[in-house]
Image (cartoon, helix red, strand yellow):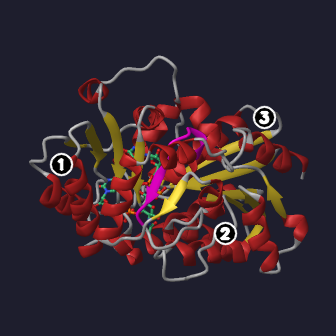
């Protein structure tokens, strides 16, 4: 019996790891153990509920306004006991969060083999996004299996000298998640409110954007939305209290922008599928939107998802207020530019990444 453990703690990791938990739990000869760090409490639990995943261990580390020290030491200490007890044959971590980094470090200390899901994404600037670029580099240093979502991500790893026999191109499990969540028949009161308008979906949360960059982004969105009576925006605000202060400060009182609680993943994916376009600094949304044919203005200075930019779905617009204002307006005015972005092909996989990862682990 092979003992495979999955460790994750934030909303995006859970969205991309729960389909894999479901796949592995259906396999013969595998014992699948789920350890959640609880780095996000409510947003994590909401995803676990949506996918029907129950954890075996919960480190429950989240604190209000937690620091990177809090997350890293909380996970590292918690994982020590879990690893000693379970002695897993492989530990799967995802992407670039501090939960993933600290769990991989714990595995390194305990000699447990790490499988890195969504491996090989790079901006090649260790300070941006912060601390994610460092986290993914560090996980990559100790991983035994690198599950790269695209050829380009695999190429990054090979360029860093990883053993080619440890690098697999699987597609991104985010696309597997969409197969589970997006429904043909779907209704929600916020969508009823937006009916007949062009629906803009907004998210913003990156640590390096907190403060003036995020204020500028939101001011640009407000200015454009106020100029176009046929536009309505929904902004499910991240639970980070600093993000909430900024969002309320810049956008409250704007009639055609609804600030909401974070949406459950089933709702968010169905909103995305019915939106006109997206403005975001999120990572995962840059993968989901191309699969649903939705143009994205990426409010960041660089992206680790160049495939989506090349495919034409993503446009990198920076964090400056004027650039976001101009690009947002242009996409509302220029039908041809909009159609070109909406028609681009999805470079992130066919929705069967989990099956490939499970096959690889089972064959070992
Ligand atoms: C984390 C990840 C980031 C990822 C993001 C996805 C790190 C360092 N950062 O950033 O890579 O893109 O998640 O959203 O790993 N909070 C709650 N309830 C929740 C979730 C968050 O109250 O369910 C509040 C808490 O006050 C918490 C704060 O949000 O302290 C920030 O959460 P944290 O995980 O530290 O940072 P994120 O910005 O969410
Ligand atoms: N998401 C969600 N509800 C929301 C906003 C986002 O379920 O209200 C999902 C979204 O579909 C994507 C993931 O959360 O799968 C992205 O999370 P986030 O932007 O917090 O993190 P990142 O991807 O930037 O690490």
Which residues lie in the magenta part? 290-299
Q: Is residue 37 above or below residue 263?
A: below
Q: What kind of element bears circle 1?
A: helix
Q: Is residue 232 above or below residue 237?
A: above
Q: Is residue 28 magenta?
A: no
In the rendered structure, the answer to whether residue 122 lies left or right of residue 218 reads right
Q: Nearer the viewer, residue 112 or 326?
A: 326
Q: Residue tagged by mark 2?
A: 107
Question: Which of the numbered marks, if any, corresponds to residue 226?
Answer: 1
Q: In the displayed orientation, state which residue is furthest to the top.
A: 185
- Secondary structure at numbered mark 2: helix
| Mark 1 vs mark 2, CA separation in Å | 51 Å
> Which of pointers 1 and 2 lies earlier in the amino acid sequence?
2
Can I make out residue 113 in this image?
no
Above or below, comparing residue 142 to residue 307 in the picture:
below
- Residue 233 located left or right of residue 31: left
Other-residue count near label 2 (Cα within 10 Å), few / some / many at <14 / 14–19 / ≥20:
many
Residue 347: percent from left, percent from top: 69, 50
Q: Residue furthest left?
A: 253
Label 3 to label 2: alpha-carbon separation = 24 Å
Quarter holding the N terminus is: top right
> Is the distance from the Cβ of mark 3 to the nearest ligand 2 atom less than 8 Å?
no
Residue at the image position 29 percent from the left and 54 percent from the top: 239
Few, some or many residues within 10 Å of mark 3 (<14, 14–19, 20+): few
Q: Nearer the viewer, mark 1 or mark 2?
A: 1
Residue at (66% x, 76% y) in the render: 109
Out of 87 and 68, give the one closest to the viewer: 68
Foreground pick, 337 / 48: 337
Q: CA distance from mark 3 to mark 1?
A: 53 Å
* Residue 27 numbered tag: 3
x then y, percent, for residue 92: 67, 56
């Amino acid at each position: 019996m092979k003992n495979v453990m999955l460790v994750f703690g934030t909303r995006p990791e859970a969205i991309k790891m729960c389909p894999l938990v479901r796949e592995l739990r259906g396999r013969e000869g595998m014992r699948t153990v789920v350890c959640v760090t609880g780095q996000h409490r409510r947003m994590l639990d909401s995803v676990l509920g949506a996918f029907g995943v129950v954890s075996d261990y919960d480190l429950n580390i989240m604190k209000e306004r937690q620091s990177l020290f809090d997350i890293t030491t909380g996970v590292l200490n918690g994982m020590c006991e879990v690893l000693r007890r379970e002695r897993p044959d492989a530990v799967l971590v995802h992407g670039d969060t501090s939960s993933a980094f600290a769990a991989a470090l714990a595995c390194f200390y305990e000699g447990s083999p790490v499988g890195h899901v969504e491996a090989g994404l790079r901006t090649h600037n260790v300070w941006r996004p912060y601390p994610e670029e460092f986290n993914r580099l560090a996980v990559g240093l100790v991983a035994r299996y690198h599950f790269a979502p695209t050829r380009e991500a695999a190429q990054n790893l090979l360029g860093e000298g990883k053993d080619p026999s440890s690098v697999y191109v699987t597609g991104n499990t985010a696309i597997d998640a969409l197969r589970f969540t997006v429904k043909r028949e779907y209704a929600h009161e916020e969508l009823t409110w937006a009916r007949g308008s062009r629906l803009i979906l907004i998210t913003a949360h990156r640590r390096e954007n907190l403060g003036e960059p995020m204020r500028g982004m939101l001011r640009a969105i407000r200015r454009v939305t106020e100029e176009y009576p046929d536009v309505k925006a929904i902004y499910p605000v991240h639970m980070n209290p600093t993000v909430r202060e900024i969002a309320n400060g810049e956008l409250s009182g704007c009639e055609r922008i609804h600030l909401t609680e974070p949406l459950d993943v089933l709702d968010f994916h169905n909103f995305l599928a019915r939106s006109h376009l997206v403005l975001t600094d999120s990572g995962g949304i840059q993968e989901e939107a191309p699969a649903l044919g939705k143009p994205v203005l990426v409010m960041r200075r660089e992206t680790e998802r160049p495939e989506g930019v090349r495919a034409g779905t993503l446009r990198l617009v920076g964090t400056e207020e004027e650039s976001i204002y101009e690009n947002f307006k242009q996409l509302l005015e220029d039908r041809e530019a909009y159609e070109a972005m909406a028609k681009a092909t999805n470079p992130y996989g066919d929705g069967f990444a989990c099956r490939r990862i499970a096959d690889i682990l089972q064959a070992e």
